[in-house]
Amino acid sequence: MSKRLRNGFVFSLDATLALIIISTIIGIVIVSLSYAEQPTIEELLILQKEHDLMKHWLVTDASEQEMVEQLQELFVNEGVRLEVDGITIFYRENSNSKKAISSRLIIFDKELNAREIVLTVFN
């Protein structure tokens, strides 16, 4: 009998219960993640537009007037809000909007002063 135990291993009751509980928790997490709401292609497109516009503003060091003009050209049918350092610069309401997609950009100048730009699109 001792020869058989050397070739294998034995789980105690505690170890068996712990493995069952851990595997149950992992199974529940995997199932709940599969039912989580995934973004639609329209939401991803809006997020990509926001990202590209903010990247352009960063590279060109755009003024607030240029930001508003470019924002109005890019998001024609959506409600939008542009905030710079906590102050709303531009806001266009969309009465049919059910969701909001928001992006935030923090810019540091040469003196390390932070400037925060928040762009929210309502669709």
Image: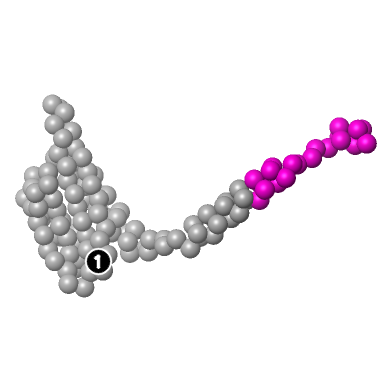
| Residue at 19%, 59% in the rendered image | 74
Write down the residue under mark 1. Answer: 123
In the image: residue 88, left or right of residue 56? left
What is the x, y in percent for residue 19? 66, 46
In the image: residue 95, left or right of residue 21? left
Q: Nearer the viewer, residue 27 or 43?
A: 27
Q: Give SS at disc 1.
A: loop
Q: Nearer the viewer, residue 121 or 18?
A: 18
Predominant SS along the magenta part: helix
Residue sticking out furthest to the front = 13
Would you say residue 59 is visible in this rendering?
no
Where the C terminus falls, by quadrant?
bottom left
User: Could you say which quadrant of the image residue 49 lies in?
Assistant: bottom left
Q: Which residues are magenta?
A: 1-20
| Residue at 69%, 42% in the rendered image | 15
Q: Nearer the viewer, residue 105 or 56?
A: 105
In the image: residue 5, left or right of residue 87? right
